[in-house]
Amino acid sequence: MNPNRPSSPEDPTGYHQGVGGSSQPQQGQQPQYGQQAQQPQQPQYGQAAQQGQAAQQGQAAQQTTQQASQSHGHFASPPGTQAQYTQPAPGQGTGSRRRGVPAWIALSGMLVVALIAGGAGGLAGGLISSSGEQAAPAPDPGPTINEPPSEAPERAPDTIAGVAQRVSPSVVSLRSAGGRIGASGSGFVIDGDYVVTNEHVSTPLEEDGIIIEYSDGKFSLATVIGSDPTSDLAVLELEDPNDVEPLEFGNSDEAVVGDEVIAIGAPLGLAGTVTQGIISAMDRPVSSDEGQSQFFAIQTDAAINPGNSGGPLVDIQGRVIGVNSMIVTMGGGFMGEQPGGNIGLGFAIPATEAEQVVKRMIGTEDAEITGPADLGVTYDGESPVIGAVIAEDDDAVEPGGPADAAGLRPGDVIVSFDGRRVNSHGELQAMVRDRSPGEEIELEYERDGERETATVTLGSGE
């Protein structure tokens, strides 16, 4: 911390001139006090395509937000139902779907979800997609809107309002230092000089430089010091850190279904947005639509939308129990229709995993210096076979690696990991990442129609 640092440093990008350090939208006009804001023509996340006409002059707005009849979910089919999805038109590459037909994904228990950064590179394709299908781009959420801080009455620390008052100052918005509109996301401060966010948020911003905005309108340039697409985590070092209380990681292993949680971030550029919900499920195996990120997630019904990515999911004590990363979303129909918004299916990287990854990136002394656990195999991602299919390539099993030492060969199909059924290679990768290097695990696999077992000692992925 620099005690001589100016309380409101000059914006190094020139992006916020004349507004005292707070970002204001640069597209469209701000509504004047007492007037109804003009609704944009393009439907917003979480709203139906038509919300009714703007209120007549002199009348209060009677607009009723309609829940999107196509709530944005692409989830594994319920037991006994037939999985349905549409393939992209040849040469289209946007994965447009027929109106009203949900893109049910049946990847044998591995949920494929959409990343939730805003704008360019955000939503990482926008929709949940089936294997091999490209997803539609997300709409531009616009610039981050930081409202001037107001003096709010204090609330009891164990209430939603009390938690929000304590945590919100440590939650930040990320945007392009080059002034590129749309590229944005969220993050949170740890250890004073560092910000945690998602890899899919930081990577698109890194080329132009990253600017961090605090809830009080102050800002700092930041540099990526570590990123990992598999865990979807990144750590940024602040050039001019603000004097805020760093957030602490909680123990997500102690969280249970039904626990109350709070998500804070900048959905659609609306910084400082607080939503609440519960933990809907634990250890939900998920994979990003591009297949880079696989982990067992905390599922929550707290409203999460594009721009929330990288923000914290906290418990009622204000401890970070997850890093918001993905949502299940149902897309639009033909002709480039935009994807929907929150339907109560959000996913966060568990704090116990995130904390170790972050410690390795920062170089904390008590970090597990080894990387995530690894089997040392390459999978066949195109195989329709249930299980994790090792590719047929000669080098698909790393010579001298854990799988090789256990006797696995190219073409083997791993169907069980430590007694848990394996339905896909993505699900197996999530199971492996959930363990530590050096652990001994019993595998079941099929070779030439015969089921065999092997004990493998997990290696390190780094």
Image (cartoon, rainbow, N blue to C red):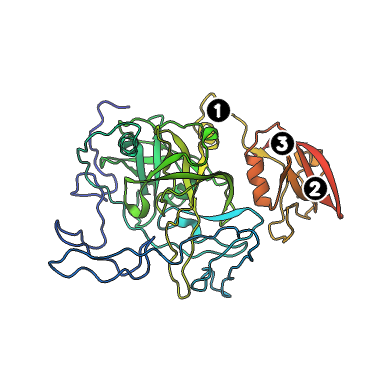
Residue at x-position 22% and y-position 38%: 152
Spatial CA span between label 3 and label 2: 16 Å
The type of residue carrying mark 3 is Leu
Left or right of 165 in this view: 404: right
Q: Closest to the observer: 340 or 209?
A: 340
Q: Which residue is mark 1?
A: 367
Numbered circle sitting on residue 458: 3
Say which mark, if any, is on residue 135. Answer: none
Which image quarter is the C terminus in? top right
Disc 3 to disc 2: CB gap under 8 Å: no
In the displayed structure, would residue 181 be above or below residue 162?
A: below
| Disc with the residue nearer the chain's start (1 vs 2) | 1
Upstream in sequence: badge 1 or badge 3 = 1
What label sits on residue 445 in the rendered view? Answer: 2
Query: Label 1 crowding class (10 Å Cα cut-off): few <14, some 14-19, many 20+?
Result: some
Residue 121 lies, in percent from the top left, at 46, 56
- Could you say whether the residue bearing mark 2 is in a helix, strand or loop? strand
Callout 3 crowding tier (Cα within 10 Å): few <14, some 14–19, many ≥20: many
| Percent of width and height locating residue 194 | 41, 34
Q: Is residue 217 visible?
A: yes
Report whether 163 appears left or right of 22: right
Residue drawn 31% across the image and 68% down it = 51
